[in-house]
Amino acid sequence: MKRESALVTRDTQYTVRNPLLSFLRALSAVVWKDLSAEMRSRELLSAMLVFALLVILIFNFALDLDPKTRQESTITAGVLWVIFTFAGTLGLNRSMAVEKDRGCIDGLLLAPVDRSAIYFGKTIANLVFMLIVEIIVLPIYSLLYNVNLFQPGLLLVTLLGSVGYVAVGTLLATMAVQARTRDVLLPILLFPVVLPIVLSAVKASGGFLDGIEMTEIRPWLNLLVVYDIIFIAIAFMVFDFVVEE
């Protein structure tokens, strides 16, 4: 009797754990597919990096200001998030366009896995690409503008902002990739939605660069966290409907 009870308990635990394991395996497969494809082609990262470096150089010559003005926190935070936003948009658009052109989206949809695993896998891969670009951009910007950007608070804001931006961007890129004018449609859909997160990230980044009190920065950090949670949940619920269209 005890042996039968133990077998039932073990089977029940396996049944409960098995969907989670299947979900994680599907998610890791999608992430590895994107990362390995990018390691072979290097199309996405190279485009994002070249674009980000060009924007840095353009601002470097366009902002013909004295050194003190160039180091102001408002200018630094604004320029940084302009770079991250536009480079991230280019990466999101390109990552989904490659999937569409190669017919990979149809293959992913035919796979017997939860559609949310596809969404989270694509989101994690896009986040990795965006973080790699940011890791390269930050020291280059620091050298050109003579600003110390390697502060724990600023790095935290960069991570939170990138998570929210990629979470929303992956969903909207999946929606826009079906249209013929996808290159134009994605920024039109994305920028109004991510405006709160960009505004919060700029305010919080400027606060850390100025060294103001944490009590004044905390509301912007809270807004970033709430934004990430809400829109990840929304994308989780609606991705199945969006990807079918």
Image (cartoon, rainbow, N blue to C red):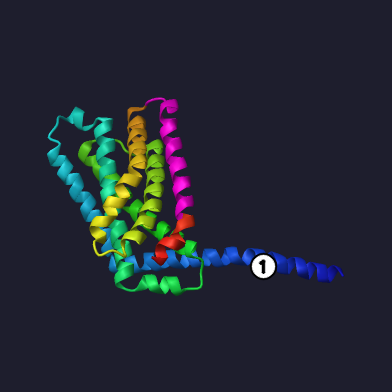
Q: In the drawing, does residue 135 fall left or right of residue 32?
A: left
151 above or below 111?
above
Name the residue type under label 1. Thr
Question: Nearest the camera: 118 or 215?
Answer: 118
Quick one: SS at disc 1? Answer: helix
Residue 225 magenta: yes
Q: Quadrant of the N terminus?
A: bottom right
Q: Position of residue 241 (x, y in %)?
A: 44, 62
Boundaries of the magenta span: 212-235
Name the image quarter holding residue 192.
Answer: top left
Q: Position of residue 244 (x, y in %)?
A: 41, 66
7 above or below 158?
below
For image coordinates 46% across by 41% down, the residue present is 225
Q: Which residue is mark 1?
A: 15
Question: Nearest the camera: 45 or 121?
Answer: 121
Residue 64 magenta: no
